[in-house]
Amino acid sequence: MHRIRFVNMTPTRDRGDNNNPTGNGDPMKKNIILMLLFLTGAVHAVKLGSLPDVQKPLRFTIDGDLLYIPDQNSLFVYSLKDFKVKQKIGGYGEGPAEFERTPSAKILKDEIVLFTYMKFARFKKDGTLQMEKRVFPLMLTNIFPLENHYILQDSHFDIEGQIVIETNIVDQDLKVIKSLYSHTKKKEYSGGKSVVRFMETAVSFQCNTNNIFLANGSKGLFIEVFDFKGQPVRVIEKDFPKIKIPENVKKKRLEDFLKSYSSDHKKRIEKIFTFEFPEYFPSVQDFLVVGDTLYIKTYRTEEDREEYIILDTKGNLLKNVFLPEAPPGSWTFYGNKFYFLKDNDEKEEWELHCLDLQ
């Protein structure tokens, strides 16, 4: 049974309307009711359905009564009413609307964008391909289409062979109009080996209909907000305690990285590379913007739950919650509900679970 824990909640005055079934006007009683729900387990996640055809899903999206899951070189569209596939967009290959690996997806109001490191494609909601473009020599990691240009995050090599990570506003030919972020990863060596760094602070962006939100964990819990022309709007910055990375976590991360290699290949890797971790977890593990709400996943845990900091788009704290564990990218929020995928080992299939935050 999964339970939700509310932290730092500020009581509000009850109004006695449809949003307040108790209608008692006493915030203490409201908090007692929430506590009783927590202790009795009345607030818990429920299984909505099984997804036996899903194998290795990427980040999914809920939109109305539809579930969009990238998997197996395609985007699968499920009905949340009966969990049957209504539509499949894409497929394996190198041709139009085909992908050599599973694409990430952006589900917008009137279109769908699918992208891999090598290319992106724009579709109508009915699956009709509108356009696609290859991005080589860039390695695309995120994209958001605007009216006649894009917000694009990529990595590429400079003339010295160093990796450059950038977030830019670009035109339709991918030429830079405005740079929002750029960082060059310097080559590092230790003991004659190349240094590979795990759990480095990632810089990523999300968008809603008005703004770009750029999270830079190297500065702590720090999010820069821009308009679609790249002009600064505000900075959201919150105090967040530093949490040391335990040695067992480092060991597990390294084992997970190496376990897909044969023993001989593993030995060759260990001769060439040395692996290093930062002393502290990054402040931001992942984040998502849905409408006017920011959901920030941290590395803080409590038993089998993980922390999410929920803010409005001006940076005001709405609540902190500890929610059921979910693998990276296998969670989302929609309509004040937390949705997450769970791998049922016994049945060898993925399940969709939901927890109401109200």
Image: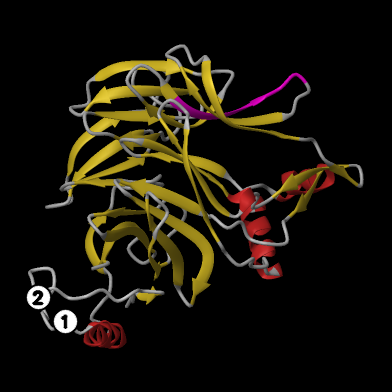
How far from the left and from the top, in percent, is residue 127? Answer: 22, 26
Image point (35%, 24%), residue name: 146
Q: Amino acid at mark 2?
A: Gly
Query: Mark 2, residues whose alpha carbon is within 10 Å: few (<14), some, or many (≥20)?
Result: few
Q: Do tag 1 and tag 2 residues touch (Cβ < 8 Å)?
A: yes
Prevalent SS, magenta region: strand
Q: Quadrant of the N terminus?
A: bottom left
Q: Nearer the viewer, residue 288 or 343?
A: 288
Image point (59%, 30%), residue name: 166
Residue 55 in sight: no
Query: Mark 1, residues whose alpha carbon is within 10 Å: few (<14), some, or many (≥20)?
Result: some
Q: How many marks?
A: 2
How far from the left and from the top, in percent, is residue 252? Answer: 64, 63
Colour pattern: secondary structure
Question: Quadrant location of residue 123?
Answer: top left
How far from the left and from the top, in percent, is residue 60? Answer: 33, 46
Does 322 appear in magenta? no
Q: Nearer the viewer, residue 266 or 67?
A: 67
Residue 53 in sight: yes
Q: Is residue 257 left or right of residue 142?
A: right
Q: Is residue 13 left or right of residue 164?
A: left
How far from the left and from the top, in percent, is residue 255? Answer: 66, 58
Image point (20%, 44%), residue name: 78
Magenta span covers which residues? Answer: 151-159
Q: Is residue 288 left or right of residue 83?
A: right
Question: Label 2, on which residue?
Answer: 16
Question: Label 1, on which residue?
Answer: 25
Q: Quadrant of the C terminus?
A: bottom left
